């Protein structure tokens, strides 16, 4: 099984949570808020989060890259970023809370939204969308989202022709394409039959179209499967259920195994800058 990834959850997992929030939380009023460990509200403070959420109605559930964005009837927006180990769970008010539940939003339906994060790398913040560049520059700087934005093949062609960076670091750059992390970058490049260290501006139009199709198809399929729950088992959806797309991984977490695509090569794993990369040298 695949081990923990420093990039999980990625776009498909966050989109799965977003869809759960859209189904179960949009339209509800947050009547009160509890904040446990203050590290998860480090961008502002416990007082500001409680004040910004109390007695507001959640109008929508949106996503930008790996960030959850929930517009409120106050005009502000709730942002939640799961990072490595964060979970957003929807629970009955009488349920026994999980360990490391750091934020609890009490809804008028007598249900609760929990932000659970054992490693506390994630965060929760309420911000003014008119000041996003100042209050949340990390979100303001995000590049194109290949699922929620218009993402024509010509846009990807423009991106790859503009740089000689290797393909994998380019896919991981959130300021260029938002939402892809280590797991899906490996899967996308394998599907597109492209070596991770190949310079982006060296690929022709046909390879760019393969790369575009791989990005859209793999992310869409992963969303349909509820995302990937890896060996750390930390990612779950809003209802606490695991995803299943890990069963369809072609290369990630399969180092030393025969390639399922070509049946001839073996999956290799390299480490660069603390990140693992999985690929088949035969078909990529």
Image (cartoon, rainbow, N blue to C red):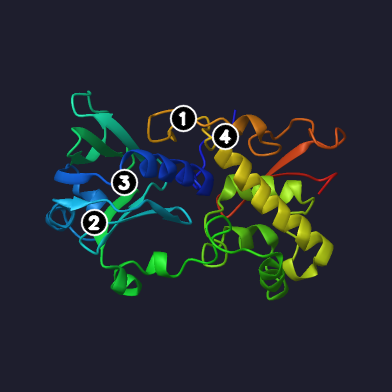
- What distance separates the C-alpha of mark 3 from that of mark 4? 23 Å
For mark 1, does the 10 Å Cα neighbourhood hold few (<14), some (14 to 19), or many (20 or more) residues?
A: few
Dot 2, how many residues are within 10 Å of its Cα: few (below 14), some (14-19), or many (20+)?
Answer: few
Cα–Cα span, label 1 and label 4: 15 Å
Vertical comparison of 160 with 272: above or below: below
Determine whether the residue tagged by mark 1 lies in a helix, strand or loop.
Answer: loop
Kindly report the distance in space between the C-alpha atoms of the residues bearing marks 1 and 3.
27 Å
Tell me the CA gap for discs 2 and 1: 26 Å
Q: What element carries label 3?
A: loop
| Mark with earlier residue (2, 3) | 3
Residue 42 — which label?
Answer: 2
Q: Could you tell me which secondary element the residue under label 2 belongs to?
A: loop
How many residues crowd mark 4 within 10 Å: few (<14), some (14–19), many (20+)?
some
Q: Mark 4 points at which residue?
A: 225
Separation of disc 2 and disc 3 at Cα? Answer: 25 Å
**Residue 14 % position (x, y):** 45, 46
């Amino acid at each position: 099984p695949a081990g923990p990834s420093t990039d999980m959850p990625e776009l498909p997992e966050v989109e799965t949570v977003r869809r759960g929030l859209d189904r179960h939380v949009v339209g509800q009023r947050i009547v009160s808020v509890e904040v446990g460990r203050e590290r998860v509200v480090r961008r502002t403070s416990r007082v500001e989060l409680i004040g910004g959420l109390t007695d507001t109605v959640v109008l929508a559930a949106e996503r930008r890259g790996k960030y959850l964005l929930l517009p409120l009837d106050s005009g502000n927006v709730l942002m939640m970023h799961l990072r490595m180990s964060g979970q957003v769970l929807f629970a009955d008010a009488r349920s026994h809370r999980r360990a490391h539940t750091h934020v609890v939003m009490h809804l008028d339906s007598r249900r609760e939204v929990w932000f659970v994060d054992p490693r506390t790398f994630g965060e929760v913040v309420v911000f003014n969308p008119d000041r996003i560049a100042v209050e949340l520059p990390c979100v303001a700087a995000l590049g194109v989202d290949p699922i929620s934005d218009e993402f024509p093949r010509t846009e990807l062609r423009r991106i790859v022709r503009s740089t000689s960076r290797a393909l994998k670091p380019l896919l991981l750059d959130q300021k260029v394409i938002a939402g892809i992390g280590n797991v899906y970058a490996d899967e996308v490049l394998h599907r597109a039959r492209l070596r991770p260290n190949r310079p982006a501006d060296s690929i022709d139009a046909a390879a760019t179209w393969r790369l575009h199709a791989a990005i859209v198809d793999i992310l869409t399929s992963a969303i349909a499967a509820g995302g990937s729950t890896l060996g750390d088992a930390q990612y779950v959806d809003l209802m606490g259920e695991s995803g299943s797309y890990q069963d369809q991984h072609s290369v990630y977490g399969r180092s030393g195994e025969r390639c399922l695509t070509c049946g001839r090569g073996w999956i290799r794993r390299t480490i660069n800058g603390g990140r693992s990369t999985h690929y088949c040298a035969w078909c990529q």
